[in-house]
Image (tube, grey):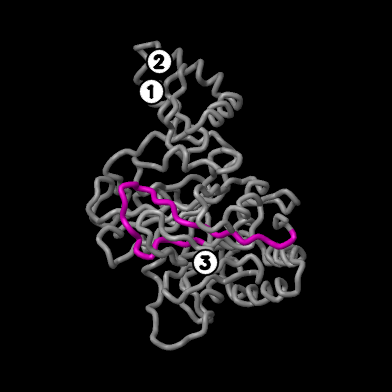
Amino acid sequence: MPKIVEIESFNNLKIEEEDDDDEEEEEPVTLGFVEKPKTSNLILRHYFPSKAGGVPAWLDPIDLPSEKSRVCGFCGDPLQFLIQVYASLDNKESTFHRTLFVFMCPSMACLLKDQHEQWKRKPEKQLRSVKVFRCQLPRSNPYYSSEPPRYDNSDKPSCAGAALCSWCGTWRGDKVCSSCKSTHYCSKMHQNMHWRSGHKQDCQRMSISLQSSDSKASNDGRTSKEIHKVASSALWPEFEIIIEDESDDTAASECDDLTSLISKEQIDDGIESIMDKFEGDDDKKGWASFYERIAKAPEQVLRYSRNAKAKPLWPMSSGRSSNADIPKCHYCDGPLCYEFQILPQLLFYFAVKNDQDSLDWATIVVYTCANSCEASICYKEEFAWVQISSSVSPS
């Protein structure tokens, strides 16, 4: 398995661009693999992790995305955390720390509707079920030390973050339970779900304890732990993302030695099930080419390259984006560039069922501002292009 690279961003691992005319497949790529974190500390925000599933480790812990931007554009439910990539840039002081966050609605019905929206060029108001946020900070900032972590249990963030939703642990908890006044929620929906799942009984006990001045101190300590524990059991499993440069031999040899989280047979069965969904010969040829490229490290869930010549590795010939499909930056009106893509292998690690209505994608491609521009808003929305297999594409 690729070794952990401490506070090493995806961008810093990429190979410098050469001046020759290499073919597209020769562009340097950094691969991401998932691994259960050895300790929970490694995925806390002050270690600047790349991770998948669970809850996000917000870079800016205070000015989180707004209520409007954190919901699915179709069903209106709060989006679920998918993945985050720590990708600092060394050409600007403002991007000393830089993380990209991807969220999506777990409903396949919403993802199918999303397909219509992403093909619309320059819509007045684009509805999406997949959203990407970019956050960046200079080295000197209010939240973290300017020195790198020491990994000796003395590392701590410089300040506390905003209160998060007690149900999902993801979004800012702007709403507070009117009874116990101790639990926070990002939405009425999550408050109702928490209430039905057991907070009704917990809330009564908490309210009684808070009324007792003698026991308030001890009960506050207990309550604090409960608040920070995520109540929802619907989140995707949490993994740390381990990074490694793609090469002819390195990724393959290291992956051969690992004790796999999923077996080779499971991967092969998944690949075959995806192949069965493709209807046209061009798509099957495209998938064969795609699988040939990833076969050296079949457990990869992410491919990263901010190289100017880099392009996504498309699993299919249909459903690809063109230059005209990619919008300009919402904030500086500059161009967006390809930065990374999420592969369907992540669905296996998330234990997503292979049912007709289950969440599915061929790849999710993320485009970000080429200038990594600055704006007054802390979490800037970027653009995701989702390619899904032709058999489930909307008509």
The amino acid on which the numbered mark 1 sits, given as a three-letter code, is Asp
Height in image: 381 above or below 277? above
Residue 365 in the figure: left or right of residue 209: right
Numbered tag placed on residue 210 in the rendering: 2
Q: Which residue occupies 45% across, 47% down?
A: 56
* Quarter of the image where one finds residue 66: top left
Numbered tag placed on residue 324 in the rendering: 3
* In the foreground, 335 or 219: 335
Taking the view exactly as shown, the residue that stands out farthest to the bottom is: 20
Q: Which residue occupies 54% across, 31% down?
A: 190
- Residue 37 visible in rendering: no
Numbered tag placed on residue 220 in the rendering: 1
Residue 61 in the figure: left or right of residue 208: left
Asked if labels 2 and 1 touch by Cβ distance under 8 angstroms, the answer is: yes
x, y percent for residue 166: 48, 32
Q: Residues within 10 Å of mark 1 (few under 14, many from 20)?
A: some
* In the foreground, 179 or 40: 179
* In the foreground, 92 or 211: 92
